[in-house]
Amino acid sequence: MSTAEGIFEPKVEPYRIAPETYVIPQLLEAPPVGMFYVNSMVITGTEPVLVDTGAPSNRQQWLDHAWSLVDPADVRWVFLTHDDHDHAGNVRQVMAACPNATLVTTWFSMARYAIDTEEFWMPFNRSRWVRDGESFQAGDRTLLAIRPPFFDNPTTRGLFDATTRVYWAADTFATAIPHPAEDAADLDAKAWREGMLLGNRLNHPWHLWLDAGKFSKHVDRVQDLDIDTAASCHAPTIHRGLIDEAFDLVRKVPELPPWEEPGQDFLEGIIAATTKPVVS
Ligand SMILES: [Fe+2]
Ligand SMILES: [Fe+2]
């Protein structure tokens, strides 16, 4: 959506990506490379599932959006891909609001989260631990926790819903975008490719030390799921027409040099542009 002046206004309303499956987006400006999403997902099946819980900076809007899609009393599962702030940022508020929900996490993720909060929080009796490669039943569907190609936290598992063939890829496919786009196909093809190669180097600097053959087998494990729709935290949704190209781009990343992030010069430019001169 754009204004009459042609300036893009971030669109941050939830949107449907597949039957009974929605993305809750947050959009952040990320100069000088454009914008990044901070997304979560909701599956409104017979036993509704929240997939990640958004960032603390967006708490009220995230909760409003989530409860516009599902009644908190109906939420049965809260699947955390990992304990990073942008994925687990509202998990305590969500678990407090959803008395019938079970937190789907892991031993290590729970330990990491517990020490990262001001008050020790380990809701053992409301949790279920699902490791990489394990599934759980959420009413009418089986959900498979499976590690995505790239990740920035050792506890990360993505989530594959075989009913809709939607895969939640957590941090994989992170893409710097020049303007809001719910669907990757709505971006200029070159901008999408470059934005994804940027995002996946920025967030996964360990790509430099990958054995291409071993990594390719790791990517196969997810690509072989036969995904129709790939949603993820930091990118527009990728539908079937671009899925193979998206995996091809991921496979290219190990061959690329590191992405050089902005340094002190850029920071000084921001300070100069935003600081008022001191009047004596
Ligand atoms: Fe992360
Ligand atoms: Fe993330």
Image (spheres, rainbow, N blue to C red):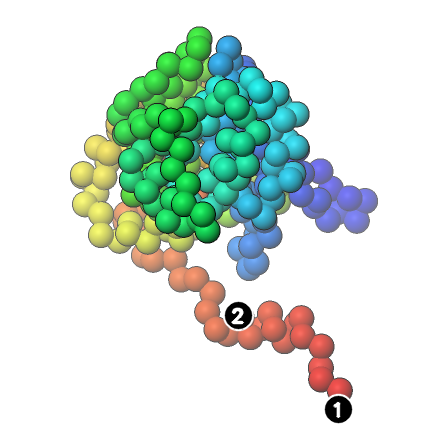
Asked if residue 184 shows in the view, the reply is no
Which amino acid, by three-letter code, is at mark 2? Phe
Asked if residue 45 shows in the view, the reply is yes
Please name which of the two marks, 2 or 1, marks the residue nearer to the observer: 1
Which amino acid, by three-letter code, is at mark 1? Ser
Residue 74, compared with residue 223, is above or below; it is above
Residue 145, compared with residue 116, is above or below; it is above
Residue 35, compared with residue 74, is above or below; it is below
Q: Quadrant of residue 134?
A: top left
In this rendering, would 200 be left or right of 55?
Answer: left
Q: Which of 148 and 201 is in front in this view?
A: 148
Identified at 58% across, 20% down, the residue is 73
Which mark, by number, is residue 266?
2
Which mark, by number, is residue 280?
1
- Dot 2 or dot 1: first in sequence order is 2
Residue 72 in the image, given as x and y percentages of width and height: 58, 23
Residue 261 in the image, given as x and y percentages of width and height: 43, 62
Q: Which residue lies furthest to the right in this view?
A: 4
